[in-house]
Image: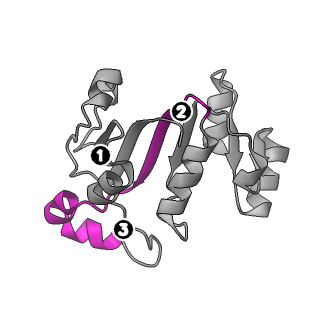
Amino acid sequence: GYNTWRFQQHGFTASEVEVSRPRCDYGKRELGVDAHYSADDLPSDFDVFYSSHVFEHVPSPADSFAEARRLLSEKGGLCIIVTPNGCNVFRNKRPDRWHQLWGRKHPNFLDDEFWRQQLGSIPHALMSRSEDGSVVAPLDEISPVTIGASNNHDLSGEELILIAHIPKA
């Protein structure tokens, strides 16, 4: 619930799904966030879907992405998903780190090819960042124009960041 709490602290109306009942209850009780055990409990009227380090753990990233699209309002919305980086660019640049991140802990290692397949012609931008600052995601360059160009930025960092403007499914 920490990211949901942070969004709320900055004036956003935010809800979250936390499948762990103890963590969900903690978020409700201690952080005062609007937490739910299932996405089925949420309306389909969100302007933004944000996920940080979740899609690499779910049984089906494609199904989870479809669920994210379902949660967006009738006009669609912005989708921001952050995962460990499974791209070959990162693997080739830092094979030791790539192998540390992939495996039992992260059974789904998503890459640019996965997102291109999921998104098709949907406008998006892919970028990455590294904890050590060696790769910085150019978030300040994101605009409707850069998202519409379906740009790929430097994909050699540890985290893969997808930003897409999703029409209603």
Q: Residues within 10 Å of mark 2 (few under 14, many from 20)?
A: many
Q: Residues within 10 Å of mark 3 (few under 14, many from 20)?
A: some
What is the C-alpha distance between the residues marked 1 and 2? 24 Å
Taking depth in this image into account, of 155 and 152 the one nearest to the observer is: 152
What element does badge 3 sit on? helix
Is residue 145 located in the magenta-colored stretch of the structure?
Answer: no
In-image side of 75 versus 150 (left or right) = right
Marks 2 and 3, the one that precedes in the sequence: 2
Name the residue: 21% across, 40% down: 153
Q: Which residues are magenta?
A: 73-100
What element does badge 2 sit on? loop
Residue located beneath label 3 in the image: 101
Is residue 92 located in the magenta-colored stretch of the structure?
Answer: yes
What is the C-alpha distance between the residues marked 2 and 3? 32 Å
Residue located beneath label 1 in the image: 128
In-image side of 139 versus 79 (left or right) = left
Taking depth in this image into account, of 111 and 169 the one nearest to the observer is: 169
Name the residue: 60% across, 46% down: 70
Marks 1 and 2, the one that precedes in the sequence: 2
The percent coordinates of residue 149 (x first, y second) are 24, 31
Residue located beneath label 2 in the image: 76
Marks 1 and 3, the one that precedes in the sequence: 3
Q: Is residue 143 visible?
A: no
The percent coordinates of residue 129 (x first, y second) are 30, 45
